Amino acid sequence: MIEKIRIAFRRSDLAIKRSELFINVIKSKFPEIEIERLIKIPEADKYMKLLFSDFGKQGGFTGVFEKALQEKEIDIAVHCGKDVPLTLPEGIAFHAFSRGDDRNVIVFLKGVVTKNGDMLEKITGETIYFKVSNFCRKMQIDSLFKTDCVLERANVPEQIAWLRNGEADCIMVSASAVDLLYLKEMEDLDFLYLERNEIVPVFNQSVIGVEYRSEDKEIEKIIKEVADKNTVEEVQAERYSLLKGGVDEMIGVNCHIEGDAMSVSGAIYSDSTAKKAALSGEAITWSYMCDKVYEKLSGRR
């Protein structure tokens, strides 16, 4: 019987909030188990001025945790699903836990930018200036809005500071970040929520997922007992889609389950622009729908 679980996570406000959601469920289901919290600083957090691409394909957020797992310093690492590599180190397993609202949200200051239907306008009539943290969002913003958009990494509180300091007119975050960080309580902010097929989220956006040692079957049993079934299926479908399309080509993919139905949205980077496609059907046919969306985007069969 497990008496104690050592759970590690990043030090950002959002990472702490997501980790607490996971920890609270573990504590409620298994009150007899002691939880020890540990904070780790991954390479991607040490060098915030570098873009994600500077850390290789994936893994800039997970390497330090995977090493700690292999050395048995920790038992579970909690991540945002989008940061977890598709190919894991030997002896490391990944499992989805739950998912918040994964839609993308444009955030801006009231009185600087206004909503005009489902579009945005700057009060002064000037071009809107976006700053975003990932390539997936930038490519789709460039295709959807007449705006200047640059890539720059920062945690959400620093991105809010960009707005207040006049360094950007708009930022884009996940709807789950809006909820977890209580951004709607900030009276100077306004929000434009975008549907999943308008700005397709990066794969596994807003997913809370965990890494653990594949040999630890008791830990695995606990994780599977608390995991949300729909999230597990959505994550499986999105990771399948990304592997099929390639990390460099498929810039965004989202699979969303409601009842027995699943909607699949994809975005691909081709000819210097973002192309999007979507399909809906029965959730049990997710691999077929993912294949069809990729075929629409790439023209391949």
Image: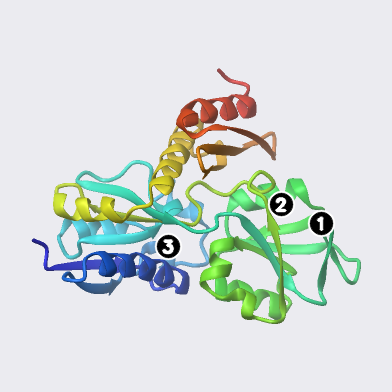
Position of residue 215 relative to residue 262, above or below, is: below
Q: Nearer the viewer, residue 31 or 246?
A: 31
- Disc 1 crowd rating (10 Å Cα; few below 14, some 14-19, many 20+) is few
The residue at 40%/72% (across/down) is: 16
Where disc 2 sits, the SS reads helix
Dot placed on the residue nearer the N-terminal end, 3 or 1: 3
Residue on which the image places disc 3 = 44
The residue at 58%/60% (across/down) is: 133
x and y percent of residue 192 in the render? Answer: 72, 62
Tell us which disc is closer to us: 3 or 1: 1
Tell us which disc is closer to us: 3 or 2: 2
The picture quadrant where one finds residue 184 is: bottom right
Q: Quadrant of the N terminus?
A: bottom left
Q: Amino acid at mark 3?
A: Ala
Q: Nearer the viewer, residue 136 or 230?
A: 230
User: Disc 3 and disc 1: Cα gap in Å?
Assistant: 33 Å
Decide if residue 216 is in sight here: no
How many numbered discs, if any? 3
User: Disc 3 and disc 2: Cα gap in Å?
Assistant: 24 Å
Residue located farthest toward the right when viewing the structure as drawn = 125
Where disc 3 sits, the SS reads helix
x and y percent of residue 155 in the render? Answer: 52, 70
Where disc 1 sits, the SS reads strand
Dot placed on the residue nearer the N-terminal end, 3 or 2: 3
Residue on which the image places disc 1 = 119
The residue at 31%/68% (across/down) is: 23
Residue on which the image places disc 2 = 141
Q: Amino acid at mark 1?
A: Met
Determine whether label 3 and label 1 are within 8 Å by CB.
no
User: Disc 1 and disc 2: Cα gap in Å?
Assistant: 11 Å
The residue at 61%/71% (across/down) is: 159
Position of residue 185 relative to residue 297, above or below, is: below
